[in-house]
Image (cartoon, grey):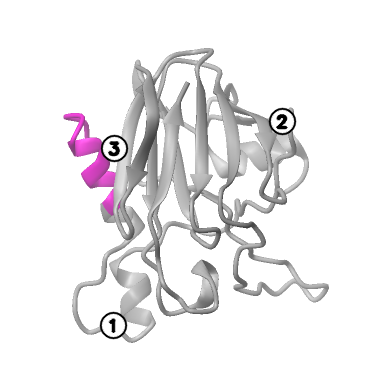
């Protein structure tokens, strides 16, 4: 599957696409301050998916550099970082936001969330995720302080910065333009925006 022109990941929503081994996916932070939760599943077996805990073990650190591969829960490479213009800050620690997260943040009504965005994006392909794996939170800036605590900070990237990934197996890649608008992970204005991706 080739998406020759950048496809929109609408603000607060999700998109998914089928990609073949060897193809590249360019994930573009169009406006510079948008976190993009990212998942990848083996096309042949959705029970095998990109795993943050397995990737941290394989990388021996909490963030990937250019040339590194994220791995699945079967410890096989699934996505490799080919190029990164964004500053290299991509969180692997935090779970996808969900209704429970927003309830804890004080929401009394339904709030868009990345967990539901993943399910909706895969549903458009006629698929159901076996679970919601912890996402690779592209562009998300969650520094670990010396005392071990976490800080929720705006992305460090600029408008148009991107991450270029190579698929190491036939996979389904899914994105959510994170709808978080309470803590400043999508910029100091807490205003989610669209992002884009291109399959090459």
Find out whether residue 120 is within the magenta segment.
yes
Does dot 3 land on a helix, a strand or a loop?
loop
Camera-side residue: 111 or 157?
157
Q: CA distance from mark 2 to mark 3?
A: 25 Å
Mark 1 highlights which residue?
107
Does dot 2 land on a helix, a strand or a loop?
loop
Figure check: 89 above or below 188: above
Mark 1 or 3: the one toward you: 1
Q: Name the residue rendered at 16%, 29% in the picture.
A: 126
Q: Name the residue rendered at 35%, 15% in the picture.
A: 44
The tag earlier along the polypeptide, 1 or 3, is 1
Where residue 124 appears, as percent x and y from the top left, is: 18, 35
Q: Determine whether label 2 and label 3 are within 8 Å by CB.
A: no
Mark 2 highlights which residue?
68
Where residue 11 appears, as percent x and y from the top left, is: 33, 58
**Label 1: few (<14), some or many (≥20) within 10 Å?**
few
Q: Which mark is residue 129?
A: 3
In the rendered structure, the answer to whether residue 58 lies left or right of residue 72 reads right
User: Which residues make up the magenta segment?
Assistant: 117-128
Q: CA distance from mark 2 to mark 1?
A: 38 Å
Does dot 1 land on a helix, a strand or a loop?
loop
Q: What is the count of numbered marks?
A: 3
């Amino acid at each position: 599957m080739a998406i020759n022109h950048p496809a929109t990941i609408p603000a607060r929503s999700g998109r998914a696409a089928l990609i073949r081994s060897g193809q590249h996916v360019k994930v573009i932070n169009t406006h510079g301050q948008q976190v993009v939760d990212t998942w990848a599943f083996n096309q042949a077996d959705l029970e095998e998916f990109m795993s943050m805990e397995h990737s941290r073990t394989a990388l021996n650190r909490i963030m990937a550099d250019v040339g590194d591969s994220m791995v699945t829960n079967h410890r096989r490479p699934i996505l490799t970082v080919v190029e990164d213009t964004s500053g290299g800050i991509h969180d692997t620690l935090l779970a996808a936001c969900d209704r429970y997260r927003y309830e804890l943040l004080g929401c009394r009504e339904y709030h868009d969330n990345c967990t539901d965005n993943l399910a909706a994006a895969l549903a458009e392909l006629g698929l159901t995720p076996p679970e919601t794996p912890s996402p690779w939170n592209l562009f998300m800036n969650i520094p670990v302080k010396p005392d071990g605590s976490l800080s929720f900070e705006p992305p460090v990237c600029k408008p148009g910065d991107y991450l270029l990934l190579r698929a190491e197996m036939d996979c389904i890649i899914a994105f959510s333009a994170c709808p978080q608008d309470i803590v400043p992970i999508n910029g100091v204005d807490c205003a989610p925006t669209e992002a884009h991706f291109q399959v090459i």
